Image (cartoon, rainbow, N blue to C red):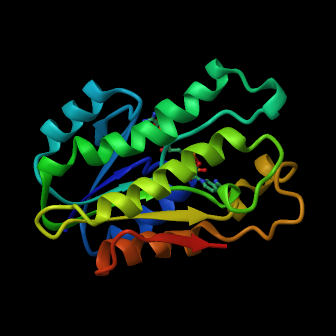
Amino acid sequence: MKILIVGASGTIGKEITRLLENDHEIIRAGRKGADVQADITSETSIQKMYEQIGKVDAVVNASGGANFSPVTELTPELNEKGIQSKLKGQINLVLLGLQHMNAKGSFTLTTGVMMDDPIAQGASAAMANGGVKAFVKAAAIEMPRGIRVNSVSPNVVEESWDRLHTFFEGFEAVPASRVALAYKKSVHGLQTGMNYEVY
Ligand SMILES: NC(=O)c1ccc[n+]([C@@H]2O[C@H](COP(=O)([O-])OP(=O)(O)OC[C@H]3O[C@@H](n4cnc5c(N)ncnc54)[C@H](OP(=O)(O)O)[C@@H]3O)[C@@H](O)[C@H]2O)c1
């Protein structure tokens, strides 16, 4: 399969790439230093990326962010990052990618544990995650040509624990390699409309 991995250089993206690269042709995408440059917050950039790489059999996204902020300090401006990046960025990868996806191909997006198990300062990311999950479930029933769409909801990963542990006190971090298996399941399997929880 020809697989586009957006965010391939990241903590989770690296493990997804490691898991898939022996059996597939991988195209790594990111804002810098990748096979193809793309910023998911820009529709023009996404379009250009798809035009550059041609048809694909799978798109995996392991990028997208949101601001952490207490709700009382969460301004519309701060919230905008989650909307532009984690929410719209991911959904636009599907909307703009459909015509570049081969029949029976798949899209796999990323949500996260904090939409189900809320943490302080996590409302903006949870909003985006919930939107992505709902989009995936609803869009799956209308996908043309046997194309599937799923998301993966990782717990906080062990490799990010030093950076994130103060937000996730009492959570049991999971290895990124275990999270990567859910992306493999999505790419190789037949299920659609799923949000695979790796908690
Ligand atoms: N780490 C965790 O514990 C955890 C837990 C739950 C959910 N998640 C979610 O999993 C995803 C990946 O997390 P991570 O920790 O692996 O992230 P990470 O280590 O920060 O890596 C992010 C990757 O995405 C790329 N990227 C960032 N912004 C981009 C943009 N606007 N357009 C295109 N590429 C972009 C980065 O490369 P460039 O800088 O070159 O663009 C990098 O390859 C995120 O959606 C995150 O919310 C992570």
Dividing the picture into quarters, in which one does residue 192 lie? bottom left
Quadrant where the N terminus sits is bottom left
Dividing the picture into quarters, in which one does residue 78 lie? top right
The reply, left or right, for residue 171 in relation to residue 59 is right
Give the percent coordinates (x, y) of residue 102.
11, 61
The residue located at (61%, 36%) in the rendering is 66
Is 164 placed above or below 178 here? above
Viewer-nearest residue: 42 or 28: 42
Viewer-nearest residue: 53 or 98: 98
The reply, left or right, for residue 173 in relation to residue 35 is right
Query: If the picture is divided into quarters, which one holds ligand 1?
Result: top right
Is 97 placed above or below 80 here? below
Viewer-nearest residue: 12 or 187: 187
Asked if residue 108 can be seen in this view, the reply is: no
The residue located at (28%, 34%) in the rendering is 46
Give the percent coordinates (x, y) of residue 145.
10, 66
Quadrant where the C terminus sits is bottom right
